Amino acid sequence: MTTAIQAQVLASVAEIFDQQVPFHNLLDLHIQHYNIHGVEVVVKMKPQLIGNIHQHILHGGVTATVLDVVGGLTAFSGLVASRDDWSLDALQQRLTTLGTIDLRVDYLRPGRGEIFTGTGTVIRAGNRVSVCRMELHNEQGSHIAFGTGTYMVG
Amino acid sequence: MTTAIQAQVLASVAEIFDQQVPFHNLLDLHIQHYNIHGVEVVVKMKPQLIGNIHQHILHGGVTATVLDVVGGLTAFSGLVASRDDWSLDALQQRLTTLGTIDLRVDYLRPGRGEIFTGTGTVIRAGNRVSVCRMELHNEQGSHIAFGTGTYMVG
Amino acid sequence: MTTAIQAQVLASVAEIFDQQVPFHNLLDLHIQHYNIHGVEVVVKMKPQLIGNIHQHILHGGVTATVLDVVGGLTAFSGLVASRDDWSLDALQQRLTTLGTIDLRVDYLRPGRGEIFTGTGTVIRAGNRVSVCRMELHNEQGSHIAFGTGTYMVG
Amino acid sequence: MTTAIQAQVLASVAEIFDQQVPFHNLLDLHIQHYNIHGVEVVVKMKPQLIGNIHQHILHGGVTATVLDVVGGLTAFSGLVASRDDWSLDALQQRLTTLGTIDLRVDYLRPGRGEIFTGTGTVIRAGNRVSVCRMELHNEQGSHIAFGTGTYMVG
């Protein structure tokens, strides 16, 4: 079950990350789903995101960007889900401290495809720091990359 | 000393990475210097690269992109520098296999500034795999991020 | 199906890693299972492996050691499994080049327990370089740590 | 300048890590120097630390252990150095929360040598989380490995 405050905050965060982050707009990166169970971040292939013109593959920086956004949102949804008595103020305060401490990206195969979807899970849930594992796959289910990230959440 | 073939290949790679990679064009990412001693990659702040509209800071994905490009170019220049009898064909062949295996980014402080410069050094030089450490700093010399990356070079 | 050469090489590697590596003997680290599907590495808690005397937990260096051994053996079994026409000589040659390039360990919770088991999977299989994910859990199934490692296999 | 409380706490931590950690005793790992400027951790080659009997090189798990110990002590000395008005109680409390969140080890060359020394620097100093870079070299100054670690310090 999701409380009204949890739902409200996550919907608001999804809207901000989907609409109001300039670099996400530049990439056409979108937050497809976001709730206390996790997040789905999507980028569609377009010519400007290409890293290798001969092979028509996604630039590794786009992959890293999607995984980092997935990790941050996953860490935050884990924090939101960890208590059902959050106040709106407390969560908004936590959101201001959300940030990536470190990120590892493992590039598994060339980023070929049309739609790239990033998902993640919390592997260490803390009140101050959370660690997440993320993955990126294309529309055919091929794993393009894995990520591991450590995030400040408080 | 740099041989004519080394100089030619690195100049050609610099030109490709500076001009012909669509994602670099989208970000206005430029290869400022590139020779057998290393690389300098530059991105100027512009509104579309912002990750946090309230704080006007660079998106972490831009940081990761610059560090990854620096790492790949550093690994390749290290390979080029490792022998002075490379043929043009051999180096062009090696360039086609250049790729990131894994990348770690350590975000040290918010990406505030106007000009962000990435540099790197090879810490493990191999004939197949090289490992590099990279850093990003702004025009005032503040370290924004460190990176560590493992690259396929053959 | 496992060929006779695959079985022979993996059995021999298991025996070496289980019996003939001095540091494994010091830790009482054992290779419980090893075949083309993967590896199980086991360490039992004993006083000398403790990192914190007040809390009676495994030293993080033991965790890193187990994960690194798991990763190397997982990478090698993946290489062995990748072809069914390996010669004995070729695999023995490959074994001499097996080595860790880089390793990330994510410590999830204190290493409490009596028996610690490490397992892994190949996430990027290459002819020269493989990347593995590893995990360590105690006898009650608690995840103690995750690992990600890049290994030279040729 | 170092305050009396800073000096007392660091001396006490050095003594504990040098003498009272069972796994450090097993390895003969010693804290050579420790003050607000950093730490020097030393391990001497001995037969039980060998990972490859044919090549007589240090096991990668020993390398990881030294780097992790260096990182934790570096992070803690950075915290101690960050204020000159710490109370003894406050620092002892912080010590109980000291722990590794994640660790990356880059293995640069085989661990040949007689005396291995680990040192480190803080690259991100926080009140809750610090990030350090560490290195291990042998008595001839060869770099054996680099490390990067994220530590909980409060």
Image (cartoon, coloured by chain):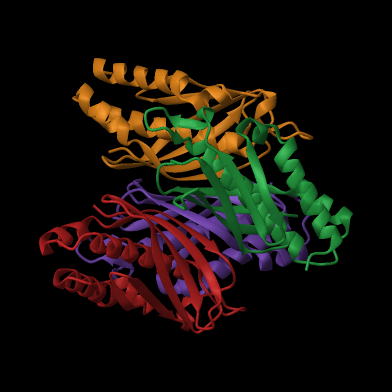
Chain colours: A purple, B red, C orange, D green
Residue at 34% x, 72% y: name it: B39
Task: Give the percent coordinates (x, y) of residue C78.
Answer: 33, 31
Visible in this render: residue A73? no
What residue is shown at x 59% (from left), y 60% (from top)?
A: A101
Q: Position of residue B134 (x, y in %)?
A: 44, 65
Residue at figure coordinates x 23%, y 63% from the top left: B80
- x and y, in percent, of residue B5 in the image: 14, 69
Which image quarter holds the N terminus of chain C? top left
Left or right position of C53 against A76: right
Measured along the vertical axis of the image, is residue D145 above or below residue C23? below
Measured as percent of width and height from the top left, residue C117 is found at: 55, 26
- Whether residue D148 is visible here, answered yes or no, is yes
Query: What count of labels does the image hold?
Result: 0
Q: Quadrant of the C terminus of chain C?
A: top left
Front-lying residue, C15 or C25: C25
Q: Is residue C148 left or right of residue B142?
A: left
On screen, residue A8 versus residue C22, left or right, reads right
